[in-house]
Amino acid sequence: MDRLSEKERIEILMILGYGDVRRRQQETCNIFNNLYPNRNPITRSTVSKLLKKFNQTGAIKDLSKSGRIKTATTEDKSLDVCVMLEDDPHLSTRQISRELDISQTSIMKILHDNKFHPYKVRLVQELSDDDFDRREEFADTMMEKCYDQNNPNFLNNVMFSDVATFCIDGNNSIIPELARLFPNLIYFRKNERSDNNVNATIISAILQNPYKPKFIKIGQAVSEIIEAFHT
């Protein structure tokens, strides 16, 4: 229903009357709707609410919708949240909520208002200076051997393997970073680290059982698989 103007509200009360000279609410609706045929008709509920408001407040204006005073999303609180994220962008909304005693809903609103977005970390293997040349050399050598007519069974004697690494310090790839601009999150993992590796190999189109080396280097584990295959 269309919102009533102050003039229309006054007119409804005048049509309704006062004291001993008062019309019924339905009759008031009919008269008002006939005066304004081009607008949505009012109902008895509209007249009843308007009369109740006038009797309680002595006014026809709507009460100001002040609601609760905003305390969680004030400028000071917003500044505290932004400063915390500038110092440590890996903080979660739950951690910020506990630290500042603000609800997570308010934290999310502050982040949205200040254009913060979560960015996912991308972990890549750290390469040394000579890794690029070694990779290119290996690729050229393998291409020559694959097309060597004197050794057509070369690929049948090649062991293809892959290693799954389980980090003991957790999966950092699922930890987002909150920032205003794209931070290009690429973290390099060093080759020497305390991880747990699981190796699986394919030899002559046969998948070998996944192998979990215990307290030995992965290179030694692969050597043991090769020796077992040839024996």
Image: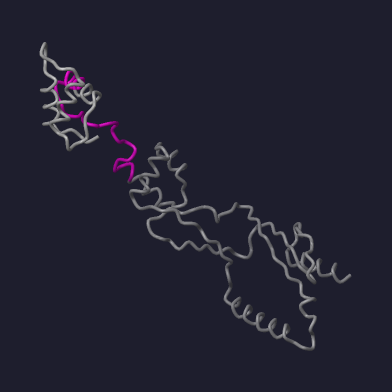
**Residue positioned 12% across, 31% down in the render:** 35
Tell me the quadrant of the picture where the C terminus can be found. bottom right
Closest to the observer, 96 or 25: 25
Picture coordinates of residue 60, whole percent (x, y) = 15, 26
Closest to the observer, 170 or 38: 38
What are the residue bounds of the magenta stretch? Answer: 51-78
Residue at the outermost right position: 231
Q: Is residue 66 above or below residue 114?
A: above
**Residue positioned 21% across, 21% down in the render:** 26
Q: Is residue 63 left or right of residue 186?
A: left
Q: Any magenta on residue 65?
A: yes
Question: Where is residue 102, by image quadrant?
Answer: top left
Q: Any magenta on residue 183?
A: no
**Residue positioned 37% across, 45% down in the render:** 81
Question: Where is residue 194, by image quadrant?
Answer: bottom right
Residue at the outermost top position: 20
Closest to the observer, 192 or 38: 38
Colour scheme of the picture: one colour
Picture coordinates of residue 139, whole percent (x, y) = 65, 80
Q: Main secondary structure of the magenta part?
A: loop
**Residue positioned 14% across, 20% down in the render:** 16
Q: Is residue 105 above or below residue 86?
A: above
Q: Is residue 58 above or below residue 104?
A: above
Picture coordinates of residue 127, whole percent (x, y) = 58, 71
Q: Is residue 89 left or right of residue 153?
A: left
Tell me the quadrant of the picture where the N terminus can be found. top left
Residue at the outermost bottom position: 150
Question: Where is residue 100, by image quadrant?
Answer: top left
Number of marks = 0
